[in-house]
Amino acid sequence: MNTILREGPKAPKDPVKKRPFFFIMQEKEIFAAPQPDGKGIQFLFMDMGRLVDAAKLSGNIGDDYMLELLRSAEGFKTLVHSIGVSVSGRNTSETVKFVMEMYPVKAGQKATKIEKDVLMNGMEEVIRLDEINWETTDKEVGQIRFEFAQPGVQATTDIRLYLNKGFIAPVQPIERTVDFHSTAYRQMIQKSLFDMGNTSRLEKVLGKAGSGEDVTIAFIGGSITQGAGAIPINEKCYARVFADSFQEKYAKGGNVNLIKAGVGGTPSELGMVRFERDILRNGSQKPDLIVIEFAVNDGDDETQGVCYESLVRKALALPWKPAVVLLFAVFSFDWNLQDRLSPVGYRYSVPMVSIMDAVTPQFPLLPDDGRVISKNQFFYDVYHPSNLGHQIMADCLIELIDKVNETHQENDPEPESFPEPAIGADFEKVELLDKAEFDKLKEKYKITSFGCGSFNETDKDLQFVEMDSEIEQTPEFKYNWHHSGKDGTEKAFTIALTCSKLVIIFKDSGNSSYGKADVYVDGNLVKTLDPLVVGWTHCNPVILFNDKRTRKHKVEVKMQDASKKFTILGFGVVG
């Protein structure tokens, strides 16, 4: 008889001592946004200082030298020994591909791509940087991606950066759960009421909802209004959360229809041009309430508020007199433009809500001293709110509605005409001119000659955004004029029209196949447009001229290099 000797379990080896680390993401919600190939991807951009901000927000890093190292690929390798990635999802047997991609010094150069399949079971996978074959042309950490096999998957992730010898990480923060029902939370939300203004239009909206009629609520703004940072973006964005809350609290039998028209990275200068198409849907929609959110997007506004006020007046002037609310969002460094833009609200007695006034005073406090929510909890990244942040933004808007419903304040009658502008209203009559609107506007602006030249194609590689409650993305400015550069020949785009002001909208790109175009007005070079400056696919409005007098102008757009691509998305015209 053979005797089988069974070995007992071997004693585990002593654990490898973990290096000091800091978080760049902690319990970060991620979502597999649908892609054309049927898969799902969560993009997290780390360039332009965003990795530094993530280290500050999530990792409690304050050391200037360490933060400076994170700004470059070489510095990153000097500081970081390894990357720890864990993902938690509903199906723990499925994997997701973690990708950290470097951006090169120049567009088109090779760049390192770090990839690792990670089980969604919450266990950490560690990637050692000394095992990576690095490209010499790496400039900085560009983006992090989570690539899922199918769209619609929700998960959370932690990403730790383990440090090389000689570096010390601070104690990593442990967050407390936000108590939405606490007195401190209610007091924080109440601080968002920047100014009630004239509430008569909002009372009309409440009356309509209370009588069982359908109500349409519209939002126009930048990436925060698009829903950036919300997971999933179409359900947890502040606009959707507010619309759902309004439906639950104030709709008595009718529906609340949501129009959401946020476009990432774009200012009110673009918003005023796309207003009729994206908010009014070319006349098919008559929103009862319009929320305008550009207080963190207009930092580079070449008019310093004129475009913003033009947009506000455009909304207020609609014949059915919708309610208008100005919403002031905030960045993680406690900044927005409410000091510049609030005079517009005061001038027209428009209600204003400030997220900055609500959340920033309590950020520096300790939890026991009155902090309701930390910066790391409120922000998804340096620019965009998390799901918690979006919820707070929606609650701040609902606070305004609740106050209007409770107080029924006495309001002065609205004047029959607008007062003098607080900043300027040069573009309140601006209209979008592109291929779709060309025939309709040809006579109005006396377009006597037109030739698209070599800009005779249509660009379909555009900036896409999630509109309304949809998860599927919609292209912006699809009726464009595109120079493909395929045959290396160039013929100028020319148009002669009668107007006083003209804005050109062109497409930015991160693709080195795009090149510069020169714009001439009446034979004079007025702008050189470089689509590679911003570095990603993006709509970019630029004022060509802003005159007081209406007269005939000839506009020409010419390529500097005929072999390069360029896209004219459209024009904003004022007669």
Image (spheres, rainbow, N blue to C red):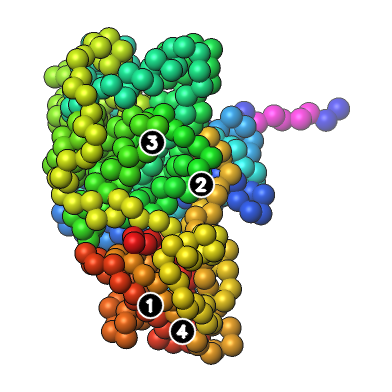
User: Which disc, if any, is residue 492?
Assistant: 4
Q: Amino acid at mark 1?
A: Val
| Along the viewing direction, whichever of 543 and 502 lies nearer the viewer | 502
Overall secondary structure of the magenta stretch?
Answer: loop
Residue interval drawn in magenta: 3-7
Instruction: Place residue 288 in its image quadrant.
Output: top left
Residue displayed at 18% across by 51% down: 424
**Which quadrant would residue 391 be assigned to in this image?**
top left
Find disc 3 in the rendering and name its residue.
Answer: 319
Q: Nearer the viewer, mark 1 or mark 3?
A: 3
Distance between the Cα atoms at labels 1 and 4?
10 Å
Front of the two marks 4 and 2? 2
Q: Which residue is mark 1?
A: 555
Going by the numbered disc 2, the residue's amino acid type is Asn
Q: How far separated are the C-alphas under marks 1 and 2?
A: 26 Å
Residue 282: image tag: 2
| Dot 1 or dot 2, earlier in sequence | 2
Which amino acid, by three-letter code, is at mark 4?
A: Ala
Dot 1 falls on a residue whose secondary structure is strand
> Dot 4 surroundings within 10 Å: few (below 14), some, or many (20 or more)?
some
**Residue 351 magenta-drawn?**
no
**Upstream in sequence: badge 2 or badge 3:** 2
Query: In front of the other: label 3 or label 4?
Result: 3
Find residue 106 and report its horizontal and vertical position in percent.
38, 76
Q: Secondary structure at mark 2?
A: loop
| Residue 298, percent from left and from top | 25, 51
- Element type where label 4 sits in the image: loop
Q: Earlier in the sequence, mark 1 or mark 4?
A: 4
Inspect the image, locate mark 3, and give the three-letter code of the amino acid beneath it.
Answer: Pro
Foreground residue among 173 and 186: 186
User: Answer yes or no: do the residues labelled 1 and 4 have beta carbons within 8 Å?
Assistant: no
